[in-house]
Image (spheres, rainbow, N blue to C red):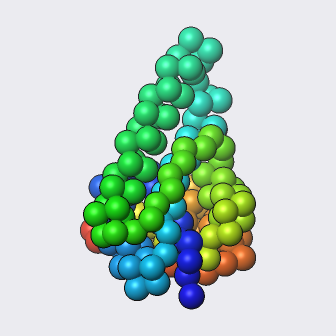
Amino acid sequence: MYDDILIPTDGSETTDETLEHGLAIAEDNDATVHALYVVDSRITAAATEETGTDLEHSLEDEGREAVTAVTDAATERGLETARDVHKGTPSKTILEYADDHDIDLIVIGTRGKSAREKVTSLGSVSERVVDNAEIPVFVVRNAGTTA
């Protein structure tokens, strides 16, 4: 049913719960696990010219570590993997990656913003992915989050 599963990661601790669900689904379907980290171009664009390059390199390094953690966990379970670090707007880049790589399922975590955070923010990456995806999206609500 699912041959290619995308697990976007931001390298945070909440990725562990998302990863457990994504890897279980991948194992059940003998699917390839794709790990993706998106360097948010809005953050790097807001940086000064002096600090922008250093910030971008730092985020790229963080991204490589994050996707390696995902693919190492998948490899330990005998799954095929692919990993990539892209620069862009996270939700758009996740959806573009999914389309470009014929992804069958996106497994993404949410931090569960408070009501106040939802009102003051532009929406979460996971919400935007769910709202705009043309394929199934499995959202993992991470423990310790609030609604």
Report the residue at 49% width, 75% height from top: 31
User: Would you say residue 87 is visible in this rendering?
Assistant: yes
Q: Position of residue 124 (x, y in %)?
A: 55, 61
Report the residue at 39% width, 57% height from top: 71
Quadrant of the rendering where the C terminus is positioned: bottom left
- Nearer-the-camera pick, 74 or 50: 74
Report the residue at 45% width, 79% height from top: 30
Quarter residue 135 falls in: bottom right
- In this rendering, would 97 be left or right of 119? right
- Nearer-the-camera pick, 2 or 52: 2
Q: Is residue 88 above or below residue 9?
A: above
Report the residue at 50% width, 69% height from top: 32
- Nearer-the-camera pick, 66 or 74: 74
Quadrant of the rendering where the N terminus is positioned: bottom right
- In this rendering, would 18 be left or right of 135? left
User: Would you say residue 19 is visible in this rendering?
Assistant: no
Quarter residue 56 falls in: top right
- In this rendering, would 21 be left or right of 123? left
Q: Is residue 31 above or below residue 35?
A: below
Q: Position of residue 33 (x, y in %)?
A: 47, 66
- Nearer-the-camera pick, 59 or 2: 2
- In this rendering, would 80 be left or right of 1? left
Q: Position of residue 75 (x, y in %)?
A: 34, 62
